[in-house]
Image (cartoon, rainbow, N blue to C red):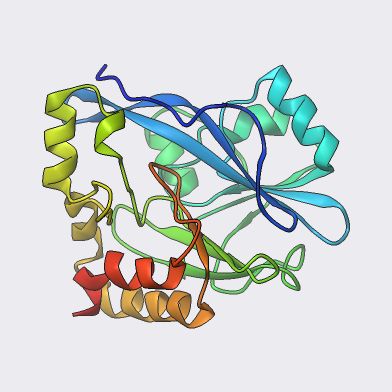
Amino acid sequence: MFSIDTYDPLNVPKAVGDDIWIVDGPVIGFQYLGMKLPFPTRMTIIRLASGKLFIHSPIRLTARLKARVDALGEVACLIAPNTIHYAGVPEWQAAYPAAQSFCAPGVIKRAKSVGMTVSFDAELADTAEPEWADEIKQVMVRGGYLSEAVFYHPKSNTLILTDLIENFESHKIKSPIWRWLVRIFGSMDPDGCAPRDMRMTFAGHRESLRKAVNQMIDWAPERVIIAHGRWYDHNGTAELKRAFRWVMK
């Protein structure tokens, strides 16, 4: 597998704002065209007013991470935000059997297609679930291969994406081949975007995607968290306009 540097320290909640943290995880290998490509992982934790935790895109669960998460509150909601980010959920379900699990449309079918069985309590839509509706807003982005739920946390003025923007940093990529591929895909910092191949999944959904992006921009986030690569700790709205110019034309 091509190598890539992680965002150390790993498995440690890092405060982003009031009651919101990111946790950088290990590199995973993503199968693509017969290659195993390295992706650093990142999940987001939001503590609700009840003290319960909303876990977005759960990464690999270690004993160290579990202890740190438990110190923040009670895990109540596990989110598989798109049709690629779901593999970590079963491990968290086993550790937190009382937690509810939510997924983007298509996740269950996708998991079954790769021989994985995972169950969810509800499928995400444009309307936020009652468990977090008063504190987190959401919009569903629907495509062919990829559908993704996007979340906005007004308290910290933070937008949470998964794969709709990827922003790999060149100096962290050790393989010249992988570095070249990232540039070709159009996902290299400082101009990270959705990879070109992923954009094709929205060919028949551009109007709905444009509507969703307009909603994200209207929320005017200061921060934009993404799952892969450098996230945006300031100028979030400007970064959205830049990264989605391919669909806003």
Q: How many marks?
A: 0
> Image quarter for residue 141?
bottom left
Q: Quadrant of residue 232?
A: bottom left
Q: Position of residue 221 (x, y in %)?
A: 52, 71
Q: Residue at x 24, y 53 (%)?
A: 198
Q: Is residue 204 visible?
A: no
Give the x, y percent position of residue 164: 36, 57
Q: Residue at x 68, y 32 (%)?
A: 92
The relative height of residue 135 versus residue 38 in the rendered view (above or below) is: below
Residue drawn at (27%, 52%), measured in percent from left and top?
Answer: 190
Give the percent coordinates (x, y) of residue 165. Answer: 35, 55
Q: Residue at x 82, y 34 (%)?
A: 70
Q: Is residue 159 left or right of residue 61?
A: left
* Viewer can see residue 41: yes
Image side of residue 207 versus residue 48, left or right: left
- Of residues 136 and 234, which is closer to you in this image? 234
Q: Quadrant of the N terminus?
A: top left
Q: Is residue 172 above or below residue 148?
A: above
Image spot of residue 228 (x, y percent): 40, 42
Residue 155 in the image: above or below residue 75: below
Q: Is residue 9 above or below residue 69?
A: above
- Quarter occupied by the C terminus: bottom left
Q: Camera-side residue: 52 or 218? A: 218
Indicate left or right for 154 with 76 as reference. left
